[in-house]
Amino acid sequence: MTQPPVNILSASRRTDIPAFYMDWFMDRIHRGFFNVKNPYTRTVKPVTVSRDVVHSIVFWSKNYAAFINARAGERLTQLGFNLYFNFTLNSESALLEPMLPPLTQRLEQLNELADVFGPDKISWRFDPICFYGTQHNGNGSTKNNLSDFPTIAEKASRLGIQRCVTSFFDTYPKIQRRLNRLCQTNYPSVFFTNPSMDKKTQVIRRMASLLTGTNITLYLCCERDVFSALDGDTRVKENACIDGHLLKHLFGGTPERKRDYGQRSKKGCHCTRSIDVGSYEDHPCYHNCLFCYANPQMDACLKKPRTQ
């Protein structure tokens, strides 16, 4: 008899739960349910969580310090949950990602996660690739945030991590409005640029070349046009950031494996269906990343962390 698929929990595409909301998350795990708010309709639906109905928890974070210090992963593993980690590690930039700890500290976090849970349970996300400038450039030349990519790649390779996921910055009206408002404060005037397709493919091929000789494969997230323009470069693959097939390979069992067409499938998202337990409104992220699509409150003011 075929076993029915079991849910995958996403924590979270909408905020950084490991950095800011692990007390809340663990409380809900022990209560056995989450109240999940639809970000469009605002309707709230209770979702049961137990080892019987949740196969895996996929965490997303830029800063796993609080998660590690609370030994949350070990506690969740003891409760029977399978864990997978999406860890965003970009080049250090006080302008683009102002509230993150130094890169050296975050690389130590990567080391800790790999030691405790295994490097095969981690996807390193270098995301997004940004081309940008400030009003101080004068001649209008642009910068990018690729400078620390070789350093991070070398560390990840030594730890045995095999996946690097990347995409290019996507502009949204809310981000442009944010930049316009920040221009009226003491924040530097910043503009993002969209490189040509030739430039994008050049960058991706260069990143893939830098990963040559490691066991790390470069994956593209929601970059169908760029992937097509690579013209059959087999060293680069399209990604599923939540991948039920990979979770089955890692942990066995019967995780959900149907594709989630509610994500950006037309742009090349291959993610599996999952339940996201984060909330833009109830769980604001305090990293204050300048390019973030999921940070509505930053448009009014730069936030400071609050107690949980």
Image: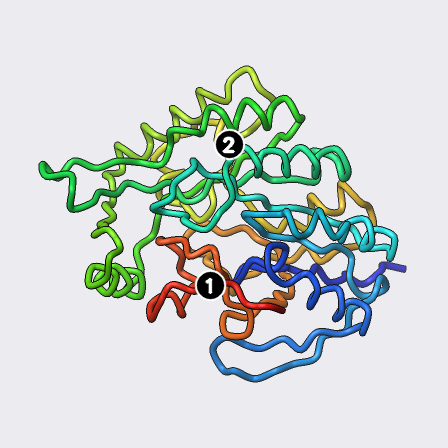
Marked residue nearer the N-terminal end (2 or 1):
2
Q: Nearer the viewer, residue 32 or 228?
A: 32
Dot in front, 2 or 1: 1
Quarter of the rendering occupied by the C terminus: bottom right
Residue at the location (35% across, 68% down)? Answer: 301
Q: Position of residue 21 (x, y in %)?
A: 63, 63
Point out the residue furthest to the top here.
Answer: 213
Determine whether label 2 and label 1 are within 8 Å by CB.
no
Task: Look at the numbered disc 1 and give the secondary structure of its residue.
Answer: loop
| Residue 79 image-quadrant placement | bottom right
Q: Position of residue 231 (x, y in %)?
A: 37, 30
Point out the residue furthest to the left here.
Answer: 139
Quarter of the rendering occupied by the N terminus: bottom right
Residue at the location (40% across, 69% down)? Answer: 296
Q: Is residue 59 above or below residue 144?
A: below
The amino acid type found where label 1 is placed reads: Lys
Pointer 1 local density, CA inside 10 Å: few below 14, some 14–19, many at least 20: few
Q: Position of residue 166 (x, y in %)?
A: 46, 40
Q: Which residue is mark 2?
A: 218
Point out the residue furthest to the right here.
Answer: 1
Task: Look at the numbered disc 2 and give the secondary structure of its residue.
Answer: strand
Residue at the location (70% across, 34% down)? Answer: 114
- Residue 304 disc label: 1
Residue at the location (64% across, 59% down)? Answer: 10
- Residue 104 disc label: none
